[in-house]
């Protein structure tokens, strides 16, 4: 009787465990994992503001996943490390243990000056942010990409300038390193089928851009891929299904099966078309 009861309990436990595993969301698990390792500069408070702003903005990207800085060793949160020190820590495999594929290292400089606006002097802050994307998994410690942005704000201790600079570099990071890409898999009338769905980070009304020189067709007999470039177009997603989405031609020439597409990020939100509105929108 005891053996039968044990077997029943064990069976129920296995059903529960495997049921939980099956139900666990797998979305995004193949997306690269990124964390901000260190921001160095003149003031620790501003450095932390920049690191927090970068993490928050990265979290809005749908093509990557972030590893919270709270999971990093105290070494990164309490000490101002040089690049060489961070690379050494990466080489020792301390970062890889928590699943980071890429780390961001940055340098922040802040400058102030008074400018005359409406007959009164106001304190303007200028934040200069330089960031480097470092490989934490394969070519460990190698700088794969870098960018710089300079932004300004008024009478706010520089917080607005830092946030805007972080937003700008993350936009560059998306465009140059981690865009959402897909392929046209079928064309039926005005419906263009693309192998992207919600798990890839696309939504209805998103715009997909077909870059020049990336239209591909297949030879009907040999199956050979043939690029028939110099054709650019924009598609707008109309419907999303599991495993694919349906788009329609927004502008440009008709494209064929095999064309490579890339999700276009939204324009930078601005107030009256002048300065950044502070809204993080991709």
Image (tube, helix red, strand yellow):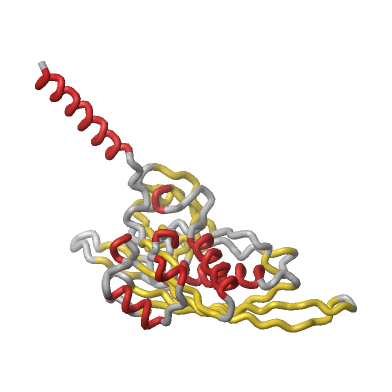
Tally of marks: 0
Residue 97 point in image, percent of width and height: 29, 62
Residue at the outermost right position? 119
Tell me which residue sits at (27%, 73%) in the image. Answer: 92
Question: Which residue occupies the foreground of this view, 75 or 278?
Answer: 75
Residue 274 point in image, percent of width and height: 72, 70
Q: Is residue 187 shown left or right of residue 264?
A: left
Question: Which residue occupies the foreground of this view, 86 or 73?
Answer: 73
In which quadrant of the rendered view does residue 136 lie? Answer: bottom left
Q: Is residue 173 placed above or below 146 in the rendered structure?
A: above
Tell me which residue sits at (70%, 82%) in the image. Answer: 112
Residue 144 point in image, percent of width and height: 37, 77
Quarter the N terminus occupies: top left
Residue 277 visible in the displayed image: yes
Residue 204 point in image, percent of width and height: 51, 48
Q: Is residue 64 shown left or right of residue 279?
A: left
Question: Which residue occupies the foreground of this view, 129 or 12?
Answer: 12
In which quadrant of the rendered view does residue 69 lie? Answer: bottom left
Tell me which residue sits at (47%, 44%) in the image. Answer: 239
In which quadrant of the rendered view does residue 64 lie? Answer: bottom left
Question: Which residue occupies the foreground of this view, 195 or 253?
Answer: 195
Q: Is residue 13 placed above or below 281 in the rendered structure?
A: above
Residue 231 visible in the displayed image: no
Quarter the C terminus occupies: bottom right
């Amino acid at each position: 009787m005891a053996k039968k009861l044990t077997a029943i309990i064990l069976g129920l436990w296995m059903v529960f465990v495997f049921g939980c595993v099956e139900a666990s969301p797998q979305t995004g698990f193949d997306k690269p994992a990124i964390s901000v390792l260190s921001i160095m500069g003149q003031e620790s408070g501003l450095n932390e503001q920049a690191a927090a702003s970068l993490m928050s903005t990265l979290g809005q990207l749908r093509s990557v996943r972030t590893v919270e800085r709270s999971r990093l060793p105290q070494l990164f949160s309490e000490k101002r490390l040089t690049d060489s020190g961070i690379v050494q820590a990466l080489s020792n495999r301390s970062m890889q243990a928590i699943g980071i594929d890429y780390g961001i290292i940055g340098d922040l400089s802040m400058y102030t000056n008074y400018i005359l606006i409406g007959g009164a002097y106001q304190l303007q802050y200028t934040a200069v942010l330089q960031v480097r994307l470092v490989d934490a998994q394969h070519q460990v410690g190698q700088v794969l990409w870098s960018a710089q942005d300079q932004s300004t704000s008024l009478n706010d201790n520089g917080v607005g300038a830092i946030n805007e600079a972080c937003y700008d570099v993350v936009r560059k990071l998306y465009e140059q390193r981690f865009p959402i890409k897909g392929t046209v898999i079928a064309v039926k009338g005005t419906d263009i089928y693309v192998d992207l769905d919600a798990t890839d980070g696309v939504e209805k009304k998103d715009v997909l851009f077909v870059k020049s020189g990336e239209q591909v067709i297949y030879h009907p007999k040999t199956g050979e891929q043939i690029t028939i470039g110099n054709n650019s177009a924009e598609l707008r997603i109309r419907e999303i299904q599991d495993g694919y989405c349906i788009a329609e031609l927004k502008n440009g020439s008709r494209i064929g099966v095999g064309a490579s597409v890339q999700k276009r990020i939204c324009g930078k939100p601005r107030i009256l078309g002048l300065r950044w509105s502070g809204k993080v929108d991709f």
